[in-house]
Protein backbone atom coordinates (compact mmCIF):
# COMPACT_ATOMS: atom_id res chain seq x y z
CA UNK A 1 0.00 0.00 0.00
CA UNK A 2 1.33 3.42 -0.96
CA UNK A 3 2.30 5.62 1.98
CA UNK A 4 0.32 8.84 2.38
CA UNK A 5 1.89 12.08 1.18
CA UNK A 6 3.78 14.17 3.73
CA UNK A 7 2.60 17.73 4.32
CA UNK A 8 6.11 19.17 3.95
CA UNK A 9 8.98 18.91 1.52
CA UNK A 10 11.43 16.10 2.13
CA UNK A 11 14.87 17.70 2.51
CA UNK A 12 17.51 15.54 0.78
CA UNK A 13 21.08 16.06 1.99
CA UNK A 14 23.95 15.47 -0.39
CA UNK A 15 27.55 16.34 -1.09
CA UNK A 16 28.23 18.99 -3.72
CA UNK A 17 30.11 16.95 -6.34
CA UNK A 18 28.55 16.32 -9.75
CA UNK A 19 28.14 12.62 -8.97
CA UNK A 20 26.63 13.23 -5.53
CA UNK A 21 24.18 15.71 -7.02
CA UNK A 22 23.21 13.17 -9.68
CA UNK A 23 22.52 10.65 -6.93
CA UNK A 24 20.44 13.14 -4.95
CA UNK A 25 18.37 14.09 -8.00
CA UNK A 26 17.91 10.41 -8.83
CA UNK A 27 16.40 9.83 -5.38
CA UNK A 28 14.44 13.08 -5.55
CA UNK A 29 12.85 12.02 -8.85
CA UNK A 30 11.93 8.64 -7.37
CA UNK A 31 10.34 10.28 -4.33
CA UNK A 32 8.44 12.72 -6.54
CA UNK A 33 7.07 9.74 -8.48
CA UNK A 34 5.69 8.48 -5.17
CA UNK A 35 3.75 11.74 -4.82
CA UNK A 36 5.94 13.75 -2.42
CA UNK A 37 7.71 17.10 -2.74
CA UNK A 38 11.46 17.34 -2.25
CA UNK A 39 14.20 19.89 -1.66
CA UNK A 40 17.92 19.25 -2.17
CA UNK A 41 20.27 20.60 0.51
CA UNK A 42 24.00 20.68 -0.21
CA UNK A 43 26.31 19.83 2.69
CA UNK A 44 30.07 20.30 2.36
CA UNK A 45 32.12 17.44 3.78
CA UNK A 46 35.68 16.98 5.03
CA UNK A 47 36.42 14.58 2.20
CA UNK A 48 35.44 17.18 -0.36
CA UNK A 49 37.32 20.04 1.30
CA UNK A 50 40.72 18.30 1.45
CA UNK A 51 41.60 16.86 -1.95
CA UNK A 52 45.35 16.47 -1.42
CA UNK A 53 45.67 14.03 1.50
CA UNK A 54 45.06 10.34 0.59
CA UNK A 55 41.83 9.07 2.13
CA UNK A 56 43.49 6.47 4.32
CA UNK A 57 45.58 9.18 6.05
CA UNK A 58 42.53 10.79 7.62
CA UNK A 59 42.54 7.91 10.11
CA UNK A 60 38.75 7.91 10.50
CA UNK A 61 35.91 6.16 8.75
CA UNK A 62 33.02 8.00 7.16
CA UNK A 63 35.09 10.88 5.79
CA UNK A 64 32.45 11.53 3.11
CA UNK A 65 29.44 10.85 5.35
CA UNK A 66 30.17 12.45 8.73
CA UNK A 67 28.94 15.94 7.83
CA UNK A 68 25.71 14.54 6.43
CA UNK A 69 25.26 12.39 9.55
CA UNK A 70 25.54 15.51 11.71
CA UNK A 71 23.08 17.40 9.49
CA UNK A 72 20.59 14.53 9.91
CA UNK A 73 20.96 14.44 13.69
CA UNK A 74 20.58 18.23 13.88
CA UNK A 75 17.38 18.05 11.76
CA UNK A 76 18.84 20.25 9.01
CA UNK A 77 17.94 17.54 6.49
CA UNK A 78 15.43 14.69 6.51
CA UNK A 79 17.36 12.06 4.54
CA UNK A 80 20.91 11.68 3.26
CA UNK A 81 21.95 10.02 0.00
CA UNK A 82 25.31 8.27 -0.11
CA UNK A 83 27.41 6.08 -2.34
CA UNK A 84 27.01 3.09 -0.08
CA UNK A 85 30.65 2.03 -0.37
CA UNK A 86 31.59 5.25 1.48
CA UNK A 87 29.35 4.46 4.47
CA UNK A 88 30.95 2.86 7.57
CA UNK A 89 29.60 -0.60 8.34
CA UNK A 90 28.31 0.63 11.72
CA UNK A 91 25.89 3.56 11.40
CA UNK A 92 25.91 6.42 13.94
CA UNK A 93 23.56 6.05 16.88
CA UNK A 94 20.10 7.31 15.99
CA UNK A 95 20.48 6.85 12.22
CA UNK A 96 19.15 3.91 10.23
CA UNK A 97 18.99 2.58 6.70
CA UNK A 98 15.80 3.69 4.93
CA UNK A 99 16.36 2.17 1.49
CA UNK A 100 18.92 0.65 -0.85
CA UNK A 101 17.73 1.20 -4.46
CA UNK A 102 18.60 -1.23 -7.22
CA UNK A 103 22.34 -1.44 -7.71
CA UNK A 104 24.17 0.05 -10.66
CA UNK A 105 27.35 -1.22 -12.34
CA UNK A 106 29.78 -2.83 -9.90
CA UNK A 107 33.08 -2.89 -11.81
CA UNK A 108 36.14 -0.67 -11.81
CA UNK A 109 37.48 0.71 -15.09
CA UNK A 110 40.88 1.85 -16.29
CA UNK A 111 40.92 5.21 -18.04
CA UNK A 112 44.20 5.57 -19.91
CA UNK A 113 46.24 8.24 -21.67
CA UNK A 114 47.43 7.65 -25.21
CA UNK A 115 46.39 4.68 -27.32
CA UNK A 116 45.43 1.16 -26.20
CA UNK A 117 48.58 -0.15 -27.87
CA UNK A 118 50.77 2.29 -25.94
CA UNK A 119 49.12 1.36 -22.65
CA UNK A 120 49.57 -2.36 -23.27
CA UNK A 121 53.17 -2.02 -24.46
CA UNK A 122 54.46 -0.18 -21.39
CA UNK A 123 56.13 -2.55 -18.93
CA UNK A 124 56.57 -0.04 -16.08
CA UNK A 125 53.37 1.98 -16.04
CA UNK A 126 52.31 4.65 -13.57
CA UNK A 127 48.71 4.15 -12.45
CA UNK A 128 46.82 6.75 -10.42
CA UNK A 129 44.50 5.76 -7.57
CA UNK A 130 44.15 6.62 -3.89
CA UNK A 131 42.19 3.44 -3.18
CA UNK A 132 44.29 0.90 -1.30
CA UNK A 133 42.04 -1.87 -2.63
CA UNK A 134 42.64 -0.86 -6.24
CA UNK A 135 46.35 -0.30 -5.60
CA UNK A 136 46.82 -3.71 -4.00
CA UNK A 137 44.86 -5.68 -6.60
CA UNK A 138 46.54 -3.86 -9.51
CA UNK A 139 50.03 -4.52 -8.10
CA UNK A 140 49.12 -8.17 -7.51
CA UNK A 141 48.47 -8.52 -11.24
CA UNK A 142 51.05 -6.03 -12.55
CA UNK A 143 54.04 -6.13 -10.19
CA UNK A 144 56.27 -3.82 -12.23
CA UNK A 145 53.86 -0.89 -12.24
CA UNK A 146 53.96 2.11 -9.89
CA UNK A 147 50.96 3.58 -8.07
CA UNK A 148 50.56 7.31 -7.54
CA UNK A 149 47.88 9.01 -5.46
CA UNK A 150 45.03 11.00 -6.97
CA UNK A 151 42.24 12.79 -5.08
CA UNK A 152 39.18 14.84 -5.90
CA UNK A 153 35.76 14.18 -7.35
CA UNK A 154 35.29 12.29 -10.60
CA UNK A 155 35.63 15.35 -12.86
CA UNK A 156 38.72 16.58 -11.01
CA UNK A 157 40.40 13.19 -11.27
CA UNK A 158 39.69 12.96 -14.99
CA UNK A 159 41.23 16.42 -15.44
CA UNK A 160 44.27 15.45 -13.38
CA UNK A 161 44.76 12.33 -15.47
CA UNK A 162 44.61 14.36 -18.69
CA UNK A 163 47.20 16.86 -17.39
CA UNK A 164 49.72 14.39 -15.94
CA UNK A 165 52.12 11.98 -17.66
CA UNK A 166 50.51 8.95 -16.04
CA UNK A 167 49.55 5.90 -18.03
CA UNK A 168 46.09 5.60 -16.50
CA UNK A 169 43.80 5.97 -13.51
CA UNK A 170 41.20 3.65 -11.99
CA UNK A 171 37.58 4.72 -11.50
CA UNK A 172 34.27 3.14 -10.53
CA UNK A 173 32.35 2.46 -13.73
CA UNK A 174 29.01 3.32 -12.14
CA UNK A 175 30.12 6.83 -11.23
CA UNK A 176 31.45 7.64 -14.69
CA UNK A 177 28.37 6.23 -16.43
CA UNK A 178 25.91 8.04 -14.16
CA UNK A 179 27.29 11.45 -15.08
CA UNK A 180 27.99 10.48 -18.71
CA UNK A 181 31.75 10.82 -18.32
CA UNK A 182 33.01 7.35 -19.29
CA UNK A 183 35.75 8.09 -21.88
CA UNK A 184 36.28 6.02 -24.99
CA UNK A 185 39.87 5.44 -23.88
CA UNK A 186 38.86 3.09 -21.08
CA UNK A 187 38.26 -0.57 -20.42
CA UNK A 188 36.53 -2.58 -17.69
CA UNK A 189 38.64 -4.33 -15.07
CA UNK A 190 36.37 -7.36 -14.84
CA UNK A 191 38.99 -9.27 -12.81
CA UNK A 192 39.16 -6.66 -10.04
CA UNK A 193 36.93 -7.42 -7.03
CA UNK A 194 34.95 -4.26 -6.19
CA UNK A 195 34.58 -2.53 -2.85
CA UNK A 196 31.72 -3.70 -0.65
CA UNK A 197 28.47 -2.11 -1.91
CA UNK A 198 30.15 -0.54 -4.95
CA UNK A 199 27.51 0.72 -7.39
CA UNK A 200 24.82 0.88 -4.69
CA UNK A 201 23.18 3.93 -3.10
CA UNK A 202 22.01 4.25 0.49
CA UNK A 203 19.24 6.51 1.77
CA UNK A 204 19.59 7.16 5.52
CA UNK A 205 17.48 8.95 8.07
CA UNK A 206 16.66 9.19 11.75
CA UNK A 207 15.38 6.03 13.37
CA UNK A 208 12.42 7.81 14.95
CA UNK A 209 11.18 9.24 11.62
CA UNK A 210 8.80 6.32 11.09
CA UNK A 211 6.42 8.05 8.66
CA UNK A 212 9.29 9.16 6.44
CA UNK A 213 10.94 5.76 6.63
CA UNK A 214 7.70 4.14 5.45
CA UNK A 215 7.73 6.40 2.40
CA UNK A 216 11.40 5.93 1.49
CA UNK A 217 11.27 2.18 2.05
CA UNK A 218 9.29 1.93 -1.19
CA UNK A 219 12.55 2.67 -3.05
CA UNK A 220 14.26 -0.39 -1.57
CA UNK A 221 15.40 -3.18 -3.91
CA UNK A 222 15.48 -6.36 -1.86
CA UNK A 223 18.08 -8.37 -3.84
CA UNK A 224 20.49 -5.41 -3.74
CA UNK A 225 19.80 -4.89 -0.05
CA UNK A 226 20.59 -8.53 0.72
CA UNK A 227 23.76 -8.53 -1.38
CA UNK A 228 25.28 -5.37 0.08
CA UNK A 229 24.41 -6.47 3.61
CA UNK A 230 26.50 -9.60 3.05
CA UNK A 231 29.39 -7.59 1.63
CA UNK A 232 29.32 -5.07 4.46
CA UNK A 233 29.10 -7.78 7.11
CA UNK A 234 32.19 -9.35 5.52
CA UNK A 235 34.02 -6.02 5.84
CA UNK A 236 32.79 -5.46 9.38
CA UNK A 237 33.83 -8.90 10.61
CA UNK A 238 37.28 -8.46 9.10
CA UNK A 239 37.51 -5.23 11.12
CA UNK A 240 38.42 -3.58 7.82
CA UNK A 241 37.48 0.06 7.29
CA UNK A 242 36.08 1.53 4.07
CA UNK A 243 39.59 2.22 2.73
CA UNK A 244 41.17 -1.20 3.47
CA UNK A 245 42.49 -3.35 0.58
CA UNK A 246 39.47 -5.64 0.74
CA UNK A 247 37.11 -6.53 -2.09
CA UNK A 248 33.68 -8.11 -1.64
CA UNK A 249 30.94 -8.97 -4.10
CA UNK A 250 27.75 -10.95 -3.55
CA UNK A 251 25.66 -11.84 -6.60
CA UNK A 252 22.13 -13.18 -6.34
CA UNK A 253 20.92 -15.44 -9.13
CA UNK A 254 17.50 -17.02 -8.76
CA UNK A 255 17.60 -18.41 -5.20
CA UNK A 256 21.39 -18.66 -4.81
CA UNK A 257 24.03 -16.24 -3.53
CA UNK A 258 27.55 -16.37 -4.99
CA UNK A 259 30.14 -14.50 -2.94
CA UNK A 260 33.72 -13.52 -3.75
CA UNK A 261 35.95 -11.88 -1.19
CA UNK A 262 39.60 -10.86 -1.41
CA UNK A 263 42.22 -9.45 0.95
CA UNK A 264 45.47 -8.21 -0.61
CA UNK A 265 48.70 -6.90 0.89
CA UNK A 266 49.50 -3.27 0.04
CA UNK A 267 52.41 -4.26 -2.20
CA UNK A 268 50.25 -6.84 -3.99
CA UNK A 269 52.59 -9.72 -3.14
CA UNK A 270 50.02 -11.62 -1.08
CA UNK A 271 46.37 -12.15 -1.93
CA UNK A 272 43.80 -14.42 -0.34
CA UNK A 273 40.51 -15.08 -2.14
CA UNK A 274 37.35 -16.84 -1.06
CA UNK A 275 34.52 -18.07 -3.27
CA UNK A 276 31.38 -19.46 -1.66
CA UNK A 277 27.75 -20.07 -2.58
CA UNK A 278 24.68 -20.57 -0.43
CA UNK A 279 20.89 -20.67 -0.88
CA UNK A 280 19.29 -17.25 -0.43
CA UNK A 281 17.44 -18.41 2.68
CA UNK A 282 20.88 -18.70 4.35
CA UNK A 283 21.75 -15.05 3.64
CA UNK A 284 21.65 -14.01 7.30
CA UNK A 285 25.16 -14.29 8.69
CA UNK A 286 26.67 -15.48 5.39
CA UNK A 287 29.06 -12.51 5.18
CA UNK A 288 30.35 -13.28 8.65
CA UNK A 289 30.94 -16.92 7.78
CA UNK A 290 32.96 -15.88 4.72
CA UNK A 291 34.98 -13.42 6.83
CA UNK A 292 35.79 -16.06 9.44
CA UNK A 293 36.92 -18.49 6.73
CA UNK A 294 39.16 -16.05 4.86
CA UNK A 295 40.79 -14.97 8.13
CA UNK A 296 41.75 -18.59 8.76
CA UNK A 297 43.05 -18.87 5.19
CA UNK A 298 45.71 -16.23 5.90
CA UNK A 299 43.91 -12.88 5.62
CA UNK A 300 44.35 -12.26 9.36
CA UNK A 301 48.12 -11.98 8.98
CA UNK A 302 47.83 -9.66 5.98
CA UNK A 303 45.44 -7.32 7.80
CA UNK A 304 47.60 -7.33 10.95
CA UNK A 305 50.62 -6.30 8.89
CA UNK A 306 48.64 -3.50 7.23
CA UNK A 307 47.56 -2.19 10.64
CA UNK A 308 51.20 -2.14 11.78
CA UNK A 309 52.15 -0.06 8.75
CA UNK A 310 49.32 2.47 9.18
Image (cartoon, rainbow, N blue to C red):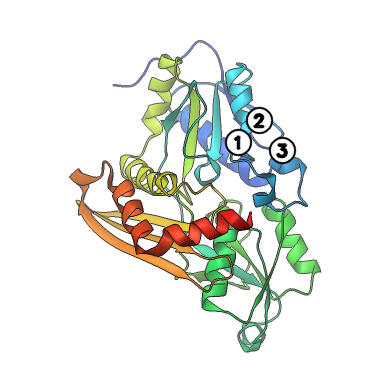
Image location of residue 123, percent across then percent down: 64, 87
Image location of residue 210, percent across then percent down: 41, 16
Is residue 173 at all visible to an observer of this figure?
no
Q: In the rendered image, which quarter is residue 110 located in?
A: bottom right
Crowdedness near tag 2: few (<14), some (14–19) or many (≥20) residues, C-alpha within 10 Å: some
Q: Is residue 138 left or right of residue 122?
A: left
Crowdedness near tag 1: few (<14), some (14–19) or many (≥20) residues, C-alpha within 10 Å: many
Q: Which mark is residue 65?
A: 1
- 209 or 102, which is in the foreground? 209
Image location of residue 225, percent across then percent down: 36, 41
Image location of residue 258, percent across then percent down: 28, 58
Distance in Å between CA atoms under marks 1 and 3: 9 Å
Q: Which mark is residue 67?
A: 2
Instruction: Give the residue furthest to the top.
Output: 7
Is residue 62 at all visible to an observer of this figure?
yes
CB-based contact (under 8 Å), mark 2 and mark 3: yes
CB-based contact (under 8 Å), mark 2 and mark 1: yes
- 141 or 36, which is in the foreground? 141
Q: In the rendered image, which quarter is residue 45 located in?
A: top right
- Secondary element under disc 1, as helix, strand or loop, is loop
For the N terminus, give its image quadrant: top left
Q: Which mark is residue 46?
A: 3
Amino acid sequence: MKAKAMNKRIRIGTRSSVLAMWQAHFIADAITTLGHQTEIVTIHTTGDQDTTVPLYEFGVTGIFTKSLDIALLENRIDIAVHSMKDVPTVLPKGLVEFAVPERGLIHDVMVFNGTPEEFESHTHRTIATSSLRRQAQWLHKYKNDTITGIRGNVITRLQKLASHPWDGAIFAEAGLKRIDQLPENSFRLDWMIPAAAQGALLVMGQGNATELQEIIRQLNHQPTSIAVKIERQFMHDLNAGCTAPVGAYAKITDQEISFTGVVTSLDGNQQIEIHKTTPIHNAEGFGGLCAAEILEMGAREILMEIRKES
